Image: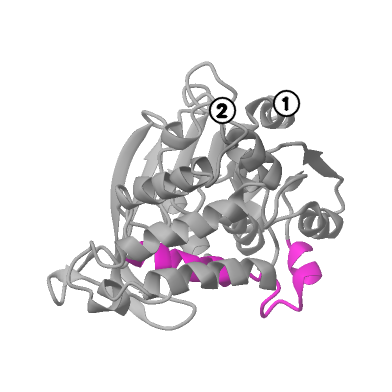
Amino acid sequence: MTGHIYNHEGRFCFEAGGALDGLTLAYHTSEGEPGGRKVVWICHALTANSDPEDWWNTLLGKGKTIDPEKYFVVCVNMIGSCYGSSGPSAVNPRTGRPWFLDFPKTTVRDIARSLDIIREHLGIEKIDLILGSSIGGFQALEYCIMFPERVGNAMFMATGARVTPWLTAFEEAQRMAVEADSSFFEAKDLEGGKTGMKCARAIALISYRSAEGYNRTQKEPGPDTIFPSRACSYQRYQGEKLARRFDAYSYWYLSHSVDSQNIGRGRGGVKSALSKIKASSTVVAIDSDLIFPPSELEIIAGGLGVPLITISSDFGHDGFLLETDQISAILQPILNKL
């Protein structure tokens, strides 16, 4: 996969208010031009980047299920992220400093519109398959509703048509953790809020995993432990790990993007919005997913008139990254028909 930066000239207006006079979008594609290859468009999850070989390399790569030599693969970094696209950590040309909290609040619909900017830039007339999980699934749903004629097939996995109060509660708890770090609002540099973000990541991880997964992988090695430490160490490690590669401002903004998800807003409700999708769709749930349980995916599948496929995992929401064999078994027949 090859990385690119595209500077879109022209005013980009945000759904919730505010605008930018130019928009920078980072994206990755297969090497070279499409050259007659079928287009597979991947929408990434919250803190991932636009290089799926970096975070989904069990499924994507030469000779693997999604082979970037066989297919023309595209993935665009979300607006609001810190991996190259416009966001709070990017430089505000008017001040010469990062935008910090002056960046416009960004919705999933804003992100979906940015995807089409790259499609047009690349000269792609039709996306043969779009797929995404989590907020990536939000993007895929929105894109298929906004541009129904441009997508042939879609796969929505571990996602939802509308954010639930349960998920919003997790997002707000994470924002509270970030905001409790006084350096976040001081906004002196991009180290601001990082201690709070470490805590936020630890909260998020509990929602991404399941009791079965934690109890299996983080149990104490001996039977006589007074104060268990293994799960504690794991939570702190995951917070530190994210802090080395992400900033709190992008994290805070993207959490609001998650909360913006409601495909039925202004469209007469979720059912009406789903009726606009023309792509041949596959809907996949994970049986242990806490934040997108199968009941949420059933709403999407029912609205599209397709069966819900449920995979089994001890790893909750993160099963979309870890259950390679099950996902490949679902995805391969779709790719074979492109």
Question: Does 9 sit left or right of 137 as displayed?
Answer: left
Residue under pointer 2: 59
- The amino acid type, in three-letter code, at marker 2 is Leu
Residue under pointer 1: 329
2 or 172: nearer the viewer:
172
- The image position of residue 311, as x and y in percent, is 77, 37
Query: Which residue is located at x 39 percent, y 69 percent?
Result: 178
In this view, the residue farthest toward the left is 96
User: Does the magenta-highlighted stretch encompass residue 139?
Assistant: no
User: Looking at the rendering, which quadrant does residue 33 occupy?
Assistant: top left
Residue 205 visible to the viewer: yes
- The image shows a total of numbered marks equal to 2
Question: Does 37 sit left or right of 316 as displayed?
Answer: left
Secondary element at image label 1: helix
Question: Does 246 sit left or right of 65 as displayed?
Answer: left
User: Looking at the rendering, which quadrant does residue 309 occupy?
Assistant: top right
In this rendering, the answer to whether 21 lies above or below 122 is below
User: Does the magenta-highlighted stretch encompass residue 259?
Assistant: yes
119 or 329: nearer the viewer:
329
Residue 134 visible to the viewer: no
- The amino acid type, in three-letter code, at marker 1 is Ala
Among the two numbered marks 2 and 1 on one chain, the one whose residue lies closer to the N terminus: 2
> The magenta stretch spans which residues?
249-276
- The image position of residue 24, as x and y in percent, is 30, 59
